[in-house]
Amino acid sequence: MTESKLVDKLQGNQKKVEQEDINKIEELRTNYKAQTVRIGQLNVERILMNQAVDKLNEAIVNEEKAYTDLQSKERELVKELQEKYGIGQLNLDNGTFTPVKSK
């Protein structure tokens, strides 16, 4: 059988698809495309959120380091003041130091 006869035979078995069915298929295809785009948008949002979380975590680490640095400075200052004034209480309101009495 020649190719043209085969095509003619296959075309003889074809049925016309109703427009309503074509419309349903096209609507489904459109919905798939829209859903695929939405999934892509959500993934981009997730990437941006992860980047924001990374920056936030970095900022937290930096602030925690600054906090521990302050604690070190406080310990150094306490040591300096104890060497200079001894152990006691400092009143910042009136700028006085009251030594603790030794027993």
Image: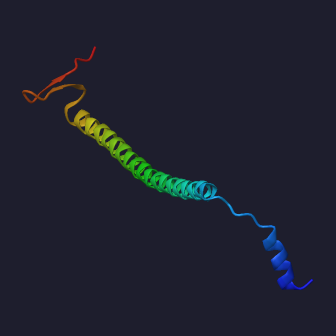
Residue 22 point in image, percent of width and height: 62, 59
Relative placement, left or right, of 80 versus 20 is left
Q: Residue 36's image quarter?
A: bottom right
Which residue is nearer to you in this view: 6 or 78? Answer: 6
Residue 83 point in image, percent of width and height: 25, 36
Residue, far front = 12
Which residue is nearer to you in this view: 32 or 84? Answer: 32
The residue positioned 63% from the left and 55% from the top of the image is: 21
Residue 96 point in image, percent of width and height: 10, 27
Q: Please determine whether, in this image, residue 83 is positioned above or below residue 59.
A: above
Q: Please determine whether, in this image, residue 87 is positioned above or below residue 49.
A: above
Which residue is nearer to you in this view: 23 or 60? Answer: 23
Relative placement, left or right, of 63 versus 21 is left
Q: Residue 92's image quarter?
A: top left
Relative placement, left or right, of 45 versus 81 is right
Q: Please determine whether, in this image, residue 99 is positioned above or below residue 5.
A: above
Residue 13 point in image, percent of width and height: 81, 67
Which residue is nearer to you in this view: 18 or 50? Answer: 18
What is the number of callouts on the image?
Answer: 0
